[in-house]
Amino acid sequence: MTKLKVTSEKGFTLIEIAIVMVIIGLLAGGGVSLMGMLSERKIRNENADYLNEAKFALISYAKIHGKLPWADNTNGDGWENNLLATGELPYLTLGMKPRDANSRVIGYALNSNLGTSRSNSCSALRAGLAGSPLVVDSDGSTTAFSVAAVLVSAGPKDADNDGNVFDDVTAGTHRGDNRDGAPNFIRRPPDNTFDDLVVYISGYPLYGEICGNPVLSVNNGSAANIFVYNITQSSDIGLVAPGSAVSFRIISGEQFSIRSAASGGGAIVASNPNTPITIAGEGTLISVP
Ligand SMILES: [Ca+2]
Ligand SMILES: [Ca+2]
Ligand SMILES: [Ca+2]
């Protein structure tokens, strides 16, 4: 008869248990930091989406009103404050949700020539934007350039530790300050001392969205030739004979007058509406009685 042989299983030694505990600890720690990174990435993506949403709301607002809204001041009521060019996004004026994924209202600045009317906006855009807001984009040169509007999400923290959630860059080739855009705003990838997100609206695309190529029609009910003079380009766009009507396709944002002689000569002829006039966006009829 065969006897069953009983063997005793050896347990884990203390050292083995300690090693396993250390490995579990390392894995858990890594998991926590991985979770942290994923959640930071998620918040950053949400902020980028929110900025783009605000950008397109601004463009649509400008299409309808021919102007960008003014900024909201730090009273945070969400409504634009007349003539305020740098402040916070007027989220109620735009009908948007108020805050980014870090629960902050985003910074907003516009070129002040774009805050009043379609003809002023198109005139400024036609001429080429100048002045603030200026942006230095680290994807390009160190030269600051003028934009129609800029939007800044301060990101999760005051990364440069200067007491303001918006960050500035005072060293290196690409510098700027997102607190107030003075001397310029700065767009660049995040690092240990900078975590703001910046998007901007350039002038020429906005011109394409809100200005178009309107038609200027001129009716001449008088007994003399009249001359349609383009003041912006210092040249006649045409002559309208007595009793006739002529339509011209023009460049939005340019200024015109009706003259009694060629090349801006003679006198301004009385008309309805009177000239000089800046024409933008929509077709316009000028009648000379
Ligand atoms: Ca306000
Ligand atoms: Ca920041
Ligand atoms: Ca800061």
Image: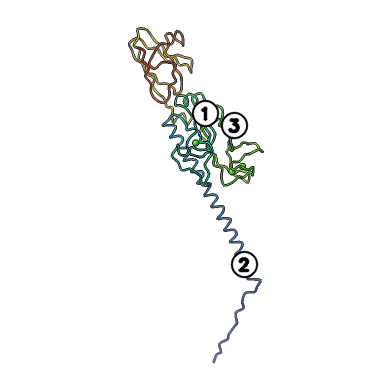
Q: Residue furthest bottom?
A: 1
Q: Give the class, few, some or many, for how many residues have Cα within 10 Å of label 3's Cα (few <14, many ≥20).
A: many
In the picture, measured across the screen, residue 220 lies left or right of residue 197, that is left
- For mark 1, does the 10 Å Cα neighbourhood hold few (<14), some (14 to 19), or many (20 or more) residues? many
In which quarter of the view is residue 217 placed?
top left
x and y percent of residue 118 in the render? 44, 26
Type of amino acid under label 2 = Met
Quadrant where the C terminus lies? Answer: top left
Check disc 1 and report its element: helix, strand or loop.
helix
Q: Is residue 269 above or below residue 163?
A: above
Q: Earlier in the sequence, mark 3 or mark 1?
A: 1
Q: How many marks?
A: 3
Residue 105, image x, y percentages? 52, 42
The residue that disc 3 covers is 144
Quick check: 259 left or right of 188? left
Location of ligand 3 given as a quarter of the image: top right
Residue at disc 3, CB closer than 8 Å to ligand 3? no
In primary-sequence order, the first of circles 3 and 2 is 2
Q: Is residue 121 above or below residue 78?
A: above
Q: Amino acid at mark 3?
A: Ala
Q: Position of residue 247 (x, y in %)?
A: 37, 18
The label number, if any, that marks residue 112 in the structure image = 1
Disc 2 is placed on an element classified as: helix
As drawn, which residue projects farthest toward the left?
243
Residue picked out by circle 2: 21
Residue 143 percent across, percent down from the top left: 61, 31
